[in-house]
Amino acid sequence: MTDTTTTTSNVNSDATQIGGRELIIEMAAVDKFFGSFQALTNIDMRVGRGEVVVVIGPSGSGKSTLIRCINRLEHHDRGRIVVDGVELTDDVRNIALIRRETGMVFQQFNLFPHITVIDNITLGPRQVLKMPKKQAEDRAMELLERVKIPEQARKFPGQLSGGQQQRVAIARSLAMQPKIMLFDEPTSALDPEMISEVLDVILELSQTGMTLIVVTHEMGFAREAANRVIFMADGEIVEVGEPEHFFTNPQEERTQLFLSQIL
């Protein structure tokens, strides 16, 4: 198994830095069990502020569990997770702080079907951030412009295509003004012709300086957007590298086999 803190050539030895970036996420010796099944084994991962990290690997390798542990959608059993200086413990105040700073976009869109697109986006800012309605709606329209569907604001989710619904889900997460965005296979539930429209939005987001961790099977996106690619198998981080190195000269046999099957 390859240690993410030592194999990447641009990792700074300073514990608060990685690749010249301020450390924003650290997972150290993290284990996760579902009953007797160990889903994550000794995960060590460090992510710098503004970094785009793409996580790939076969189904069942622990990719989704890894990012769900970062905002406590899953409880890790051993090890340490720190997000922007806050350690993730059973203290509900810490969990709330981390969730405020961490947006998440799922495979399924999870929009409320009975309210309009703009109401889906403004619900969190109004209820959690206590943002005035006019300010929240202005922000929602800015975000809908950003994801290129402002004309859908007054429609209901069921009136939108899958790609449009996923873009609404991205806008909804961004409305909470997170420092970190987690994407759990955001295109896996989409028809092939809708995948590029969602990836284009995430690619644009990757160029804004926001910290992104993206679990995906889209290798073209990984090549273009990632600062680093993490390959997982059997609940372990097997290899980490910059895209150019990772896709042209993988070091680990399991990585080589995986890439030979999908590229």
Image (spheres, helix red, strand yellow):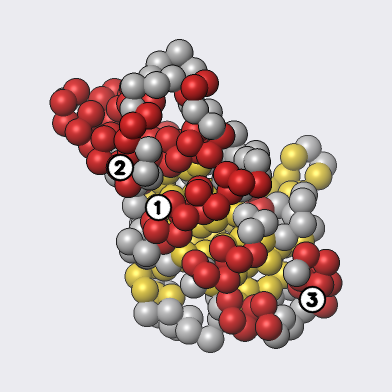
**Three-letter amino acid code at disc 3?**
Gln
- Give the position of the N terminus as an image quadrant: bottom right
Upstream in sequence: badge 1 or badge 3: 1
Q: Which residue is mark 1?
A: 180
The answer to whether 104 is drawn above or below residue 80 in the figure is above
Identify which residue, 6 or 48, lies in the foreground: 48
Label 1 environment density (alpha carbons within 10 Å; few <14, some 14–19, many ≥20) = many
The answer to whether 192 is drawn above or below residue 120 in the figure is below
**Distance between the alpha carbons at the discs numbered 2 and 3:** 41 Å
Q: Which residue is mark 2?
A: 145
The residue located at (79%, 76%) in the rendering is 256
| Quadrant position of residue 253 | bottom right
**SS for callout 2:** helix
Label 3 environment density (alpha carbons within 10 Å; few <14, some 14–19, many ≥20) = some
Disc number lying in front (1 or 3): 3
**Three-letter amino acid code at disc 2?**
Glu
